[in-house]
Amino acid sequence: MPLPERFDAGLYFIGHIETPWRDRAACPRNARESDAVCTVVVDPRWAAALAGVETCSHLLVLYWMHEARRDLVVQVPRRHGTARGTFALRSPVRPNPVAASVVRLVGLEGTRLSVVGLDCLNGTPLVDIKPYFASTDAVAGAVVGWHATPER
């Protein structure tokens, strides 16, 4: 399926992410599969935006999966053999390759945040950082029905 001819909006990458993973095959399948300490590097022009971040135990990090394909609308998950729509999956392959991970903040030095809980390539562009509120962001009864029963 061809992509639209032009973008609908623009955004600023506010930094980048440093991880130990240099290719997609080496990345964890999801952020909870790794306890690697990664570094979220915020561009110095956004340094003032970090005020108060050190009080957060966890953050929501949004990033741009810059090497992902953007043309699939139906995919077959690796561990589930049935085709699913892209919007029912957490795959990096999507029209807008935005990823979100809840990370544990383990340190902050200047504009460098040490975190645990990422699953992206080294050099991944950073889109945004938000505080994670367990009281409003966690939904205890949330279900992904197709994922509840393994197919293989």
Image (spheres, helix red, strand yellow):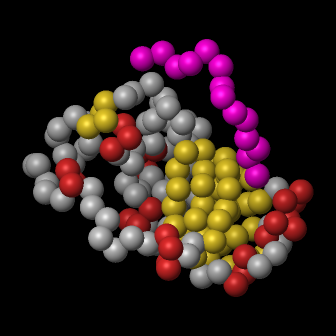
The residue drawn where x is 50% and y is 79% is 135
Position above or below: 49 against 98 = below
Position above or below: 28 against 72 = below
Position above or below: 128 against 59 = above
The residue drawn where x is 44% and y is 36% is 93
Residue 75 makes an appearance in the image: yes
Question: What is the span of residues highlighted in magenta in the rendered image?
Answer: 1-14
Image quadrant assignment for residue 5 = top right
Q: How many numbered circles does the render carry?
A: 0
Image quadrant assignment for residue 61 = bottom right
**In the depicted view, which residue is nearer to us: 1 or 81?**
1
Q: Does the magenta stretch include residue 139?
A: no
Whether residue 20 sits left or right of residue 107 in the image: it is left
User: Overall secondary structure of the magenta stretch?
Assistant: loop
Whether residue 24 sits left or right of residue 133 in the image: it is left
The residue drawn where x is 39% and y is 48% is 90
Whether residue 19 sits left or right of residue 113 in the image: it is left
The residue drawn where x is 79% and y is 70% is 50
Percent across and percent down for residue 89 are: 34, 45
Q: Residue furthest left?
A: 152
Percent across and percent down for residue 140 are: 34, 74
Residue 36 makes an appearance in the image: no
Percent across and percent down for residue 48 are: 87, 68
Q: Is residue 12 magenta?
A: yes
Image quadrant assignment for residue 139 = bottom left
Percent across and percent down for residue 37 are: 57, 71
Please identify the quadrant where the N terminus is shown.
top left
